[in-house]
Amino acid sequence: MKIGVISDTHDLLRPQAVAALRGVDHILHAGDICGPAVLRGLGEIARLDAVRGNNDRGAWAADLQTSVAVEFDAITVYMLHDLSELDIDPAVAGFHIVISGHSHRPLIESRNGVLYLNPGSAGPRRFTLPIAIGLLDINGDQIHAELKILEV
């Protein structure tokens, strides 16, 4: 199963991000969406789960949760916007992957047997940080994660 991971679009759904996500089975958006058009556009590509970020306000964002748990094959994923607000021990809770956004810094690292993925920002450029998304390939209990820097 191929999972596209995107965050911090800030009301900008870049054509490069859409192209990079084509063909995925599921999309996870880690918050700071900033408008319903982004959700509609991503929802046209694949099934979508999203969390509310600190900039997601208004009636359109009222139904978004601050965190979600999603399961793909034997892999469980915990997603929230700001990693500093993580209030569980993911390893103890049985999560294999934690997805977050907020920092705009792409990151893949393993901590205590848990994969942490921040896809970076696919929205407006912030400072000199790259425009990026994440991709997960999940096959049973096997996980392959990568970051894709978008040419913009």
Image (cartoon, grey):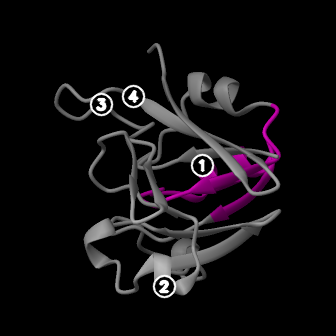
Image vertical order of residue 53 relative to residue 29, above or below? below
Q: Badge 1 is on which residue?
A: 38
Element type where label 4 sits in the image: loop
Element type where label 2 sits in the image: helix
Gap between marks 3 and 4 measured at Cα: 6 Å
Residue 10 located within the stretch drawn in magenta: no
Specify the segment rendered in magenta: 23-49
Specify the label residue 131 is tagged with. Answer: 4
Of tags 2 and 1, which is closer to the observer?
A: 2
Specify the label residue 53 is tagged with. Answer: none
Q: Quadrant of residue 145?
A: top right
Q: Badge 2 is on which residue?
A: 92
The amino acid marked with disc number 4 is Ile
Q: Are marks 4 and 1 in contact (CB under 8 Å)?
A: no
- Of the two numbered discs 2 and 4 on the same chain, state the one appearing first in sequence: 2
Gap between marks 2 and 1 measured at Cα: 34 Å
Q: Badge 3 is on which residue?
A: 125
